[in-house]
Image (cartoon, rainbow, N blue to C red):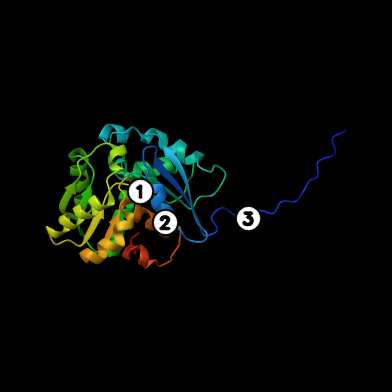
């Protein structure tokens, strides 16, 4: 039987991906936490995030963190190539510190010029500004090779880390398995030791975003995490202004005027 001529139909196209916002998320190849947390935090009609992975070794050390810089431009450029993204988010707090936020932003914009960029470190500082505080309690899973420069970075940006606690673990596959109960207990003990303006739980691998509303109610102060702050910051950079108090006090706030 002879092949009939193909019937051609007129396609109707939607205007774009993510009618309100399309966010590109660059997560580490070892991170088993951020994708699930962002699904909950960014569960909004018309807001979409699209995930890709950056190659990373298991150990969170300055040299392994720095090694990711060479992958960033290519990974960002390949993510939904041909589609407009409103924001690019690089999901590593410690690598943003080691590589430098400016270098991360330059690498991500290498093939996507003029796209706003956020990192957990950038977002946490924006969150503290929105909270109107310059003092914090900081909880991390990091070893002191990362903790000390992180504390110094906050100091150099006009912020005071009044108390610092850590699980002292440099294995990403183990950090993602630290239980939320253990994180909550550590947070409560840390904040009880000194008066602070906010609690920050750093590291995208820690399963802590869902704890924010409960910790705020228990501790009586603003709380955010790496994933929590970066989801909020990405939303606000994409001009999504929804107020979502059930996700924590940060999600009721706009960006401060200096952002």
Secondary structure at badge 2 equals: helix
Q: Where, by quadrant of the figure, is residue 106 drawn?
A: top left
Q: Nearer the viewer, mark 2 or mark 1?
A: 2
Residue 159 can be seen, yes or no? no
Write the residue at 22% across / 60% down: 198
Query: Is label 1 in contact with label 3 (beta carbons under 8 Å)?
Result: no
Q: Nearer the viewer, residue 86 or 56?
A: 56
Write the residue at 45% across / 61% down: 239
Q: Is residue 87 above or below residue 168?
A: below
Q: Residues within 10 Å of mark 3 (few under 14, many from 20)?
A: few
Pointer 1 residue: 119
Q: Is residue 219 above or below residue 114?
A: below
Secondary structure at badge 1 equals: loop
Q: Nearer the viewer, residue 189 or 258?
A: 189
Pointer 3 residue: 14
How far apart marks 2 and 3 lie (CA) works out to 25 Å
Pointer 2 residue: 40
The answer to which of marks 2 and 3 sits earlier in the sequence is 3
Q: Residues within 10 Å of mark 1 (few under 14, many from 20)?
A: many
How far apart marks 2 and 1 lie (CA) works out to 19 Å
Q: Nearer the viewer, mark 2 or mark 3?
A: 2
């Amino acid at each position: 039987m002879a092949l009939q001529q193909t019937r051609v139909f007129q396609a109707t196209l939607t205007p774009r991906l993510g009618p309100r916002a399309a966010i590109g998320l660059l997560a580490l190849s070892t991170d088993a936490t951020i994708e699930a947390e962002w699904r909950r935090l960014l569960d909004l009609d018309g807001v979409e995030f699209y995930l890709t992975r950056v190659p990373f070794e298991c150990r969170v050390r300055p040299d392994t963190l720095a090694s990711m810089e060479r992958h960033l431009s290519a990974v960002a450029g390949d993510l939904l190539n041909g589609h407009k993204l409103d924001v690019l988010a690089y999901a590593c707090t410690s690598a943003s510190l080691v590589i430098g936020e400016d270098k991360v932003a330059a690498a991500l914009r290498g093939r996507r010029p003029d796209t706003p960029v956020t990192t957990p470190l950038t977002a946490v500082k924006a969150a503290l500004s929105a909270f109107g505080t310059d003092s914090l309690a900081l909880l991390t899973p990091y070893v002191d090779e990362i903790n000390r420069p992180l504390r110094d970075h906050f100091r150099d940006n006009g912020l005071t880390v009044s108390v610092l606690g850590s699980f002292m673990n440099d294995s990403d596959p183990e950090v993602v398995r630290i239980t939320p109960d253990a994180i909550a207990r550590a947070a409560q003990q840390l904040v009880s030791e000194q008066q602070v303006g906010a609690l920050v739980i750093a590291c995208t691998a820690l399963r802590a975003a869902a704890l924010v509303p409960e910790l705020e109610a228990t501790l009586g102060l603003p709380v955010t995490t790496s994933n929590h702050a970066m989801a909020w910051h990405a939303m606000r950079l994409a001009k999504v202004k929804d107020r979502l108090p059930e996700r924590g006090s940060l999600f009721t706030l706009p960006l401060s005027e200096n952002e």
